[in-house]
Image (cartoon, rainbow, N blue to C red):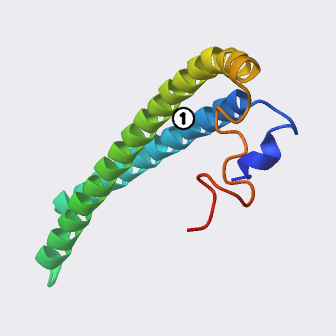
Amino acid sequence: MTPLASSAPPGASPWALSGLVHERLHGLAARYDAAAEHLEALASRCAELARAEGWTGPGSRAFAARAQRHAQDTRGQAEQCREVAELVRQTASMLGQRVQEVESVLELGGPLTGALTAVLGPVALGVGWGAGPGPGLGAAA
């Protein structure tokens, strides 16, 4: 997988990067779903081998039991893949909601911060606090 930073053009907005992350998360979920389907098919083949009645020689029951265990284990792994895919989808949705929240705060906050800075000055809004020596929040105790 390529790093996201190289995928986004320089100077791209965070929302474009968020879209790329969202897209990749859904792609990852689809790959987990595909892996679950492959594991389920493999489990079915193992179960068919366990039920096959062609061989009744020594070790046949042990082989059938082992094949049945492998089928059950593989089905469990397929279910885990499906659960991970669902978690990845939920994460992508939550990320989308967070980005919308941040966008709405920035839409309101940017002009509001500019207006307050113009009226009250940068110090009143905390701009420069802790930037240098002197009394205040950034001073050493």
Q: Position of residue 94 (x, y in %)?
A: 45, 31
Dot 1, how many residues are within 10 Å of its Cα: few (below 14), some (14-19), or many (20+)?
Answer: many
Foreground of the two, 132 or 135: 135
Question: From this viewpoint, which residue is outermost toward the front?
Answer: 135
Foreground of the two, 53 or 3: 3
Residue in view at x 86 percent, y 37 percent: 9
Residue in view at x 46 percent, y 49 percent: 35
Question: From this viewpoint, which residue is outermost toward the right?
Answer: 10
Q: Position of residue 72 (x, y in %)?
A: 21, 59
Q: Which residue is mark 1?
A: 26
The reply, left or right, for residue 124 in relation to residue 40 is: right
In which quadrant is the C terminus drawn?
bottom right
Instruction: Give residue 48's quadrant in the image.
Output: bottom left
Q: State whether residue 66 is above or below residue 136.
A: below
Amino acid type, mark 1:
His
Residue in view at x 72 percent, y 46 percent: 4
Instruction: Give residue 102's quadrant in the image.
Output: top right
Q: Position of residue 104 (x, y in %)?
A: 57, 17
